[in-house]
Amino acid sequence: MDVLTNHPWPGNVRELANFIERAVILSHGNELQVSTAELKASQSRVFAPASTFEQAERNVIIDALRAASGQISGRRGAAERLSLKRTTLQNKMRKLNINRAEYGS
């Protein structure tokens, strides 16, 4: 609980809501299980404003790919994290010249 309350939440309430929603979906049983490692990793990133919409979209896709260890589809894939169809995400990645292999584990 301390990690959640002390995190700066640079994406405001929406980021917190998404984090909690993801934790609810991924938790088993009656206890909420959260991955605080994800929060600690995001604290070390510097958020610079994107210069264009295309760059902002690229940054969001890359962040989702990193969080999904390069996985595009499936239960924990980047497409699900972004609420996109797999084919839509793949088309955007092709357009933005994003190679998922660079963001896998």
Image: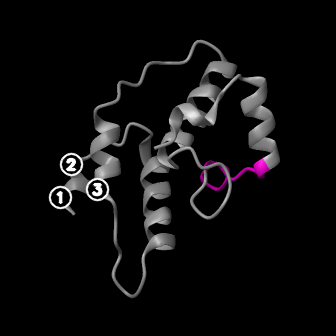
Residue at point 55% right, 18% down?
Answer: 50
Q: In which quarter of the image is residue 88?
A: top right
| Residue under label 1 | 2
Circle on res. 6:
2
Task: Decide: is 81 above or below 92.
Answer: below
| Residue under label 3 | 36
Q: Is residue 28 located in the magenta-colored stretch of the structure?
A: no
Q: Which colour scheme is used?
A: one colour
Please say whether residue 8 is visible from this viewpoint: no
The residue tagged with tag 1: helix, strand or loop?
helix
Please say whether residue 85 is visible from this viewpoint: yes
State which mark lies toward you, 3 or 2: 3
**Mark 1 surroundings: few (<14), some (14-19) or many (≥20) residues within 10 A:** few
Residue at point 67% right, 21% down?
Answer: 53
Sequence-wise, the earlier of marks 3 and 2 is: 2
The residue tagged with tag 2: helix, strand or loop?
helix
> Is the C-beta separation of discs 1 and 2 under 8 Å?
yes
